[in-house]
Amino acid sequence: MKIVIIDANSTMIPHMGVMIDEAIAASKEGHEITYITCGAYLDNCYGSPLKNNLCCQVCIKGYSRNLAPLESDTFRHKVLANYHTAEIDADITEFDYEFSSTEQLKEKFFNGTDVGYAALSSFISNTRNMNPLMTGFTKKVLTTMLKTAVRMSRVCVEIEKAERPDKVIIFNGRMPETRPILRHFQKKGIPVDIMEVVPKDLNGGFRKFVFKNSLPHSIEYFRKQIDDLWDADPVKARERGESFFQNRRKAEFAGDKIYTKDQTPDLLPNSWNKEARNIVIFNSSEDEFAAIGAEWENKLFASQIEGIEYIFNLVDKYPNSNIYLRVHPNLKKIRYKYHTNLYGLKNHPRIHVIPSDSKVSTYAMVDAANVVVSFGTSVGVEAAYAHKPVVLLGSSFYKGLGFCHEPKTKTQAEDFIFTEELEPLVNENIVKYGNYIMSDKGMDYAHYNFNCKRIEILGRKTPNAYMEDQELAPFEKYLIVAMRAWRYLQRVILKWRIPEA
């Protein structure tokens, strides 16, 4: 089998290590490997949105040092420029880059690829700004990301012609440098394996796993995955699924950051009234899924804050109701309006906004609530597990799994939240969800150790700096830290230069 691996940024860890591990494994199985890297060909990338020549050279050096020992007659390392043609330049130049809003950007397609979504996804991930003011600088940054997506989409045509792959492997698939690869080879019926990682602990350990011909963020794919993982061993799956909810309650590792570790167990807001109909709203980090695709667009409300405001505006109509909004802890440091404006909505004595850094217990509120309203956070699943009626008002991985009330209209949402004696919807999918998060669905490295190390500088440890098997000279370890600092600085620059609309 001829396998093409397209990998764009060696400074992204453990991404590069995962891809090299896959390449070595496939090579040892007798497959022919073409490993294609950027080589400074793209207009920018997720790791370097403000393209810098020094950063590109460090990235190129990183690939050369790690891939050179692997090269052979059946393992070739090439760069994107090897596939460039004059026709690519013409197509890139002729593309219409005009847009004046993020909604117009989402409508940009090239050769059937949602290049606008790809560009916006990279931008939001780097800035967490979902509604940027369209200044000249903003449009320049977004246009560059859009051009990257168009360029990659076009060069995929030439890669297919030259390599005739039986399979393609990429990482994540959401960004401008990868989404066009998925879309192009999907159309051609050529299998695409999308690699991702999941942390196995909070100390730099990772496992890799594969999504077949689908973005990791696909709700439809998720539904299939939870069934497959459950059916493999239902008894163990139930035990793992239960452990997800138990670990979350105990503020122990359960596949993600521990958001409740600083909360006080059993602490309810001082204003809690046991005699009222207590409605607790849990919002989510809306920016995390803001530019995935139409599947993640909210059909009832344009934004979470619009949905929350809609509920708040109904409070006078229902005098026995108290409304509590628990702001997601992941928004703690976010200074954009989709977070800060939440606190300005508190304009009624029966409306209470619990800040993202509050000591109030999420689980105490779940247990005491009459109705839980979720905009997609995993607390919605946990509330269903606690036999609470849950109303889901946003898109989520657990949308359609049958354990949330999912209103089709705003009027129905109002009835569910304020008047109906809702029954908890309890089914096996709740524990299936927990099993998916906790299951051993990933794989440890086989040939290239992509688990990460930190460096101690002046008595303090850096974030993950390099991988166990990463080929680095001693000084290059500090250079890698410098590159990670530069990546962070680019994000600071983008946030500073690009205000919110």
Image: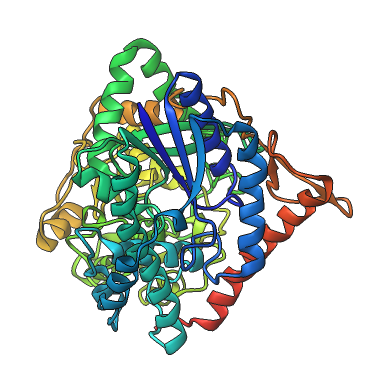
Image check: 288 left or right of 420?
A: right
Image check: 486 left or right of 460?
A: left
Q: Nearer the viewer, residue 326 or 302?
A: 302
- Residue at 88%, 51% (x, y): give it: 459
Q: Nearer the viewer, residue 481 or 237?
A: 481
Q: Position of residue 442 (x, y in %)?
A: 46, 27
Q: Residue furthest right?
A: 458
Vertically, is 81 above or below 305?
Answer: above
- Residue at 30%, 32% (x, y): give it: 166
Q: Quadrant of the N terminus?
A: top left
Q: Position of residue 76 (x, y in %)?
A: 50, 38
Q: Position of residue 396 (x, y in %)?
A: 29, 48
Q: Nearer the viewer, residue 426 or 360?
A: 426
Q: Position of residue 440 (x, y in %)?
A: 46, 22
Vertically, is 58 above or below 5?
Answer: below
- Asked which quadrant contains residue 219, the reply is top left
Colour option used: rainbow
Q: Residue furthest bottom?
A: 136
Q: Is residue 42 visible?
A: yes
Q: Is residue 396 visible?
A: no
Q: Nearer the viewer, residue 403 or 496?
A: 496
Q: Quadrant of the C terminus?
A: bottom left
For the image shown, how many numbered marks are present on the structure? 0
